[in-house]
Amino acid sequence: MNQPRPPRIVVVGSTMMDLVAYADRVPGAGETVVGSSFQVGFGGKGANQAIMARLLGAEVSMVCCVGTDGYGTETLANFADRGIDTTWARRAPGTSGVAPIWVEASGQNRIIILPGANLAMDPEVAVAAVCDGPPPGVVAGQFEVPQSVTAAAFGAARQRGAITVLNPAPAAPLAPALAAAADWLIPNEVELAAVASQDAGGAMPSDGPLTDGLPGDELLRSVAHRAGCRLLVTLGEAGSALVTTSGDVLRIAAPVVDAVDTTGAGDAFVGGFIWALAGGRSETDAVHIATTVAADSVTRPGTQLSFAAPEDYELLLADL
Ligand code: RIB
């Protein structure tokens, strides 16, 4: 886990309280099924990515907005317990973000988010956070808070020489101002399709959506070209695909594991990737690290609850 430099990261993003129901299968329309267990845990894509980067050893500042309810208080306490800087966390009247989640026996999840206070984030606070202290190595954002906030933060990040990493999740049209300020785009397959069809005016581009069930090289290359930034697509158990600076597509396999809950695996991946990039690792090293921590996370239930302890990551990443 040696890093060429100590990673400093600013995450501009969401927090949610995850309400997770586990069942052998999810109900169909109008149906009730009996579940097997239930778990409440800290979630939200931004928070999950911040926590993973912190568990790996980064100094992390979290820019977020929670509600004035008990979930908001607990969320801020969780960040403090984990050693995450909450100088730029704010509270807004009303409810914090919540996410009811269903997980079936295969580990596959279905998530509804109710963003609540996440939508009250202030772009000026995000800019101030990025401009505070030593320059961050990476500023990361997602789509669970207003894109205008992330775009403002990324603009400031560019001025400070930080790498900007956008996880466009959940799938939504990408605002041009945000696309212009992003160095890296890390979608999953669903989010990639949204970005690709947006580029093509609402239809999948003619260079073909899928090869053997996975996005083909031509599609990946054309999305990267049109987005004007680096593209790294997460593909679940099929690993990930990286479009290199020369336009080649590098496919990185994921280790075979027994998945019990895939919730938060994409966030573990992004958290691992930004930790490695901010620490000065090569992008291929960063993808391998991201793949390893994401695969590990699906072997345990929960979102942040499925992440390992810092000492476990020392062992897991000892050879990387
Ligand atoms: O990516 C998983 C996360 O998505 C969950 O923690 C949930 O809160 C939603 O934000």
Image (tube, rainbow, N blue to C red):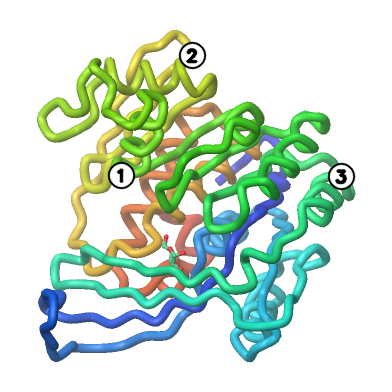
Return the residue at label 2: 245
Q: Quadrant of residue 183?
A: top right
Q: Are marks 1 and 3 in contact (CB under 8 Å)?
A: no
| Nearest to N terminus: mark 1 or mark 3 | 3
- Tell me how far mark 1 sits from mark 3, CA to CA: 33 Å
Q: Nearer the viewer, residue 271 or 217?
A: 217
Q: Are marks 1 and 2 in contact (CB under 8 Å)?
A: no
Left or right: residue 129 versus residue 206 is right
* Secondary structure found at label 1: helix
Q: Residues within 10 Å of mark 1 (few under 14, many from 20)?
A: some
Return the residue at label 1: 190
In the rendered image, the vertical position of residue 123 relative to residue 47, given as above or below: above
Inspect the image, locate mark 1, and give the three-letter code of the amino acid beneath it: Val
Q: Is disc 1's CB within 8 Å of ligand 1?
A: no
| Residue that protrudes farthest toward the front in the picture | 201
- Tell me how far mark 1 sits from mark 2, CA to CA: 23 Å
Quick check: which quadrant has ligand 1?
Answer: bottom left
Task: Find residue 93 and report its horizontal and vertical position in percent.
Answer: 72, 81
Task: Find residue 92 and report its horizontal and vertical position in percent.
Answer: 73, 76
Task: Find residue 193 and report its horizontal and vertical position in percent.
Answer: 31, 36
- Looking at the rendered image, the quarter that the C terminus falls into is top left
Nearer to us: label 1 or label 3: 1
Left or right: residue 214 versus residue 244 is left
Inspect the image, locate mark 3, and give the three-letter code of the amino acid beneath it: Cys
Q: Does residue 298 appear anywhere in the picture? A: yes
Return the residue at label 3: 131
* Secondary structure found at label 2: loop
| Residue that protrudes farthest toward the top in the picture | 246
Q: Does residue 318 appear anywhere in the picture? A: no
- x 18%, y 88%: residue: 35
